[in-house]
């Protein structure tokens, strides 16, 4: 694509997309040798001097922001009557695209992205910059997982300039705050409202307000209560739902005071803590609409005939105006009653049946629709009882327009108990079978003596097989610990290292003691109780005495002894013979030498041993000599 901006400095690589106000390009900054994003205002906006003046001023103000979660602005300029802005290039999708592909997002990921946006807004708000068009389209996701807010300058300039070029409201009405929809002044709470809508969308995959036209959506922002996020995604925890509903409150004063406070509540949710206490304030009813009263006229004399009068053109106009005024006034009164109607406190419906809840709501002038009654498994509440409600109890709500919702327990989730005790299944296999069947609790293990069943085999279960049982219910397994009086011989562990002795003793309970020794090196077993070869009850405790040093001094077999022995035992024929010398000390048996021996040839070798040893000499595979040392 042969296109550039900034007198050739920014060479266009490709077109990234186009929006209602700008066309976006990926470009190469030939001066600083880096990839950048270039946004070029559409012609109808670039020709508006008031807009472009505001656009430049706001872009320069945003360029002063320096934050890892805000897309940096590098340059602003004009090239052949085209206003452009040069920004940091982010190699990744925008959040709207990501939500469409992956929603609902994992709670942890949605919290992480929201906290990063809070950081960006907190930084901007501290510099007196309000975005006014926070939406997932303006959140870019870098390849390293970092979320970056963009389009501060364009949104801020557009909010102050005319929007008649396109005939539409700048930005997306799905994320507008109620005060934006009413055309009122906006502040930091408007950005936080929009972030609340984004968080709602991330965890549910849907939007709280939708409609056939922007006007109908805007009206819902002003008048309707959102469906609780958990109604769309039951995995949304109650503490996160409370945070979202506070963020998208109709009234700015009921939302979070600032982005920092919003982030603190998100962190509490991430740590499994409840959200900060929050109770919406009561609304004060405004003055009633002023009504024009007709003057009282004197009554005509009895029997008098009223003259007929023709209604002139001016009279017709006045009549039409009065009728229109009455119609508009009636409509206003209806809408006003809908928006600012009577309020009441939401009753506590927990532990009630649906019929009991309906009666309690009726006394408060409220009603719940059948489609807002959701049945779910719940192990904490008996079947048929309410375990959750929206709005929360004691919340101040509008009688005429609040959608109520309740969640009714279907009892705990159950599964069929597998047969664990009838097929000689070991404990680990039984635990795996329980997990595969959907059970989530750790069973209680009871060990019992069974002379007829090997150790570790499941011999009993509660509940029994094929029983329908709560997945988080208590389960008991009885496991055989083998015969009561089974005995084994104490292994010969003296002379072993401590680790080797423990392995040789298997499942026995082992106690240890230490003692100085000059016969065994440090860490070696010098004694045991019971002694090697004695009978010991399986599973009983044994004691090992471990050397603490200093250990033996090296001893050597005298070379002359070996030479004499060989001369005495090797056959006297002339052919060579294969000689193997073996030694046994605390290390066990060791082959210390192997060689072809010619009769009459002297043999000398120093052989070390600790602390005592047995020497064996084999000639042509036959043991010819054995001696204990010293």
Image (cartoon, grey):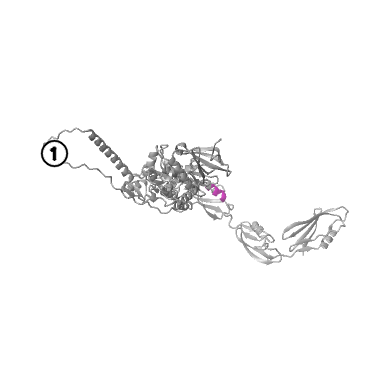
The quarter in which the C terminus is drawn is: bottom right
Q: From the top left corner, tell me how far across and down residue 628 is, in percent.
A: 77, 62
Q: Magenta span has 426?
A: yes
Q: From the top left corner, tell me how far across and down residue 237 is, in percent.
A: 45, 49
In this view, which residue lies farthest toward the right? 574
Q: Magenta span has 45?
A: no
Q: In the image, is residue 154 above or below residue 623?
A: above
Q: Is the magenta stretch mostly helix, strand or loop?
A: helix
Q: Name the residue under label 1.
A: 300
Q: Can residue 502 be seen in this view?
A: yes
Front-most of residues 176 and 437: 176
User: In which quadrant of the rendered view does residue 329 lie?
Assistant: top left
- Asked which secondary structure carries label 1, the reply is loop
Front-most of residues 554 and 210: 210
Q: Can residue 175 be seen in this view?
A: no
Q: From the top left corner, tell me how far across and down residue 192 is, in percent.
A: 43, 48
Q: From the top left corner, tell me how far across and down residue 413 is, in percent.
A: 46, 46
The quarter in which the N terminus is drawn is: top right
Q: What stretch is highlighted in magenta?
A: 425-434
Residue at left 63%, top 65%?
513
Position of residue 592 in the picture relative to residue 384 (left or right): right
Front-most of residues 353 and 372: 372
Q: How many residues crowd around disc 1 within 10 Å: few (fewer than 14), some, or many (20 or more)?
A: few
In this view, which residue lies farthest toward the left? 303
Front-most of residues 50 and 245: 50
Position of residue 72 in the picture relative to residue 500 (left or right): left
Q: For the image shown, how many numbered marks are present on the structure?
A: 1
């Amino acid at each position: 694509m042969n296109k550039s901006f900034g007198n050739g400095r920014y060479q266009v690589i490709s077109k990234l997309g186009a929006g209602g106000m700008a066309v976006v390009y990926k470009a190469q900054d030939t001066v600083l040798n880096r990839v950048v994003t270039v946004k070029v205002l559409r012609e109808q906006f670039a020709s508006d001097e008031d807009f472009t003046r505001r656009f430049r001023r706001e872009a320069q103000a945003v360029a002063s922001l320096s934050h890892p979660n805000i897309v940096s602005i590098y340059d602003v300029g004009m090239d052949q009557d085209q206003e452009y802005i040069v920004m940091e290039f982010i190699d990744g999708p925008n959040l709207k695209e990501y939500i469409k592909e992956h929603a609902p997002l994992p709670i942890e990921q949605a919290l992480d992205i929201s906290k990063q946006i809070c950081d960006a807004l907190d930084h901007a708000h501290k510099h007196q910059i309000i975005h006014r068009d926070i939406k997932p389209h303006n959140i870019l996701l870098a390849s390293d997982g970092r979320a970056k807010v963009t389009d501060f300058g364009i949104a801020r300039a557009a909010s102050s300039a005319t929007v008649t070029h396109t005939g539409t409201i700048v930005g997306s009405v799905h994320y507008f705050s109620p005060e934006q929809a009413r055309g009122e002044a906006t502040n930091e709470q408007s950005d936080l409202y929009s972030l609340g809508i984004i968080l709602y969308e991330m965890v549910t995959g849907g939007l709280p307000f939708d409609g056939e036209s922007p006007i109908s959506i805007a009206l819902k922002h002003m008048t309707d209560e959102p469906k609780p996020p958990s109604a769309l995604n039951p995995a949304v925890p109650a503490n996160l739902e409370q945070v979202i509903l506070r963020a998208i409150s109709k009234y700015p004063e009921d939302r979070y005071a600032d982005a920092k406070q919003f982030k603190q509540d998100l962190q509490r949710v991430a740590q499994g803590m409840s959200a900060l206490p929050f109770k919406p304030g009561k609304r004060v009813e405004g003055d009633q609409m002023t009504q024009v009263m007709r003057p009282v006229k004197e009554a005509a004399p009895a029997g008098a005939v009223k003259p007929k009068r023709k209604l002139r053109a001016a009279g017709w106009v006045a009549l039409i105006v009065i009728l229109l005024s009455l119609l508009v006034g009636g409509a206003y009164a209806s809408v006003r009653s809908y928006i600012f109607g009577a309020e009441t406190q939401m009753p506590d419906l927990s532990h009630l049946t649906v019929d009991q809840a309906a009666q309690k709501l009726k006394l408060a002038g409220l009603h719940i629709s059948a489609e807002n009654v959701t049945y779910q498994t719940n192990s904490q509440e008996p079947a048929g009882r309410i375990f959750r409600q929206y709005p929360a109890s004691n919340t101040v709500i509008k009688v005429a327009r609040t959608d109520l919702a309740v969640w009714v327990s279907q009892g705990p989730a159950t599964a069929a108990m597998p047969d664990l005790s009838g097929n000689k299944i070991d404990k680990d296999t039984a635990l795996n079978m329980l997990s595969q069947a959907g059970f989530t609790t750790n069973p209680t293990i009871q060990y019992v003596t069974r002379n007829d069943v090997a150790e570790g085999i499941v011999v009993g279960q509660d509940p029994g097989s094929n029983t329908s049982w709560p997945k988080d219910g208590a389960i008991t397994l009885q496991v055989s610990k083998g015969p009561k009086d089974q005995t084994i011989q104490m292994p010969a562990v003296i002379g072993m290292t401590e680790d080797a002795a423990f392995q040789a003793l298997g499942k026995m309970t082992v106690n240890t003691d230490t003692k100085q020794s000059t016969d065994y090196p440090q860490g070696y077993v010098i004694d045991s109780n019971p002694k090697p070869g004695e009978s010991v009850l399986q599973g009983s405790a044994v004691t090992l005495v471990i050397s603490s040093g200093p250990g033996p001094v090296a001893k050597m077999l005298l070379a002359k002894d070996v030479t004499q022995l060989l001369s005495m035992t090797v056959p006297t024929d002339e052919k060579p013979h294969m000689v193997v010398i073996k030694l046994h000390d605390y290390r066990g048996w060791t082959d210390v030498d192997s060689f072809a021996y010619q009769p009459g040839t002297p043999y000398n070798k120093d052989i070390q041993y600790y602390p005592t040893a047995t020497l064996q000499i084999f000639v042509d595979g036959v043991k010819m000599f054995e001696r204990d040392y010293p």
